[in-house]
Image: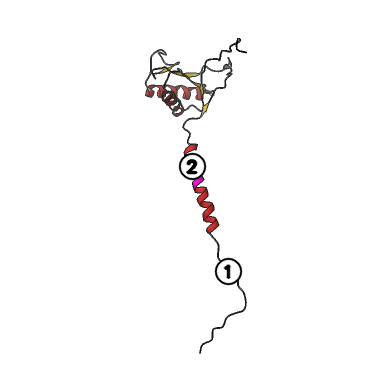
Amino acid sequence: MAYFHQRSSRHPIAEINVVPFIDVMLVLLVIFMITTPLLTQGVKVDLPKTEAKALPPDQKEPVIVTVDGAGNFYLNSASKPNQPVTPRVLSNLVTSQLAASIAIGNQRPVLVRGDKNANYGKVMEAMVLLQQAGAKSVGLITQPALHDKSAG
């Protein structure tokens, strides 16, 4: 007969319980799956406040892109500012103007002036074109709010 000899000394069991780790990882996975679509940003924009201040007079003339109600683009520094320009021409003109102002050492401010009836997608398209042309920030031009003195 064979006798099995068992040791009486106790050794620690080297097992890791991974169930809590898996639970935490699944919770994190669900959180990231929910929050990731919310974090997508296309264009960094400096949104105007309700009481916007005017640009300082010593600042260079800004690059202003106007989007009319029909969705046409206009550039204030184009050879014909009252003629609509295509998105490609707009991007090329703004790229060259911003490159020239950076070479001098002073980047011109970049602003978008959108008609209140303009398609939001067209205003965003103008902002994306300006960002791709090298604008670090894009501001929005608004009409000053009129305060009704009879209501106050």
Mark 1 or mark 2: name the one nearer the start of the chain: 1
Percent across and percent down for residue 130 are 45, 25
Q: Residue furthest front?
A: 151
Is 75 above or below relative to 127? above
Is 15 above or below relative to 133? below
As measured in the structure, the alpha-carbon distance from the residue carrying label 1 to the one carrying label 2 is 39 Å
Query: Which residue is located at x 52 percent, y 49 percent?
Result: 27
Q: Nearer the viewer, residue 72 or 24?
A: 24
Query: Which residue is located at x 53 percent, y 25 percent?
Result: 47
In the image, the segment drawn in magenta is 30-36
Q: Secondary structure at mark 2?
A: helix
Q: Which residue is mark 1?
A: 13
Q: Tell me the crowding category of disc 2: few under 14, some 14 to 19, or many 20 or more residues within 10 angstroms, Cα based.
A: few
Percent across and percent down for residue 39 are 50, 37
Q: Residue furthest bottom?
A: 1
Query: Which residue is located at x 54 percent, y 86 percent?
Result: 3
Q: Amino acid at mark 2?
A: Ile
Number of marks in the rendered image: 2
Percent across and percent down for residue 73 are 40, 19
Q: How is the image coloured?
A: secondary structure
Tell me the mark number nearer the camera, choosing from 1 and 2: 2
Q: Residue furthest top?
A: 150
- Predominant secondary structure, magenta span: helix
Residue 146, magenta (yes or no): no
Q: Nearer the viewer, residue 76 or 7?
A: 7
Q: Secondary structure at mark 1?
A: loop
Q: Tell me the crowding category of disc 1: few under 14, some 14 to 19, or many 20 or more residues within 10 angstroms, Cα based.
A: few
Question: In this rendering, would 142 be left or right of 96?
Answer: right
Residue 33, magenta (yes or no): yes
What number is the disc on residue 34? 2
Is 5 above or below relative to 92? below
Q: Amino acid at mark 1?
A: Ile
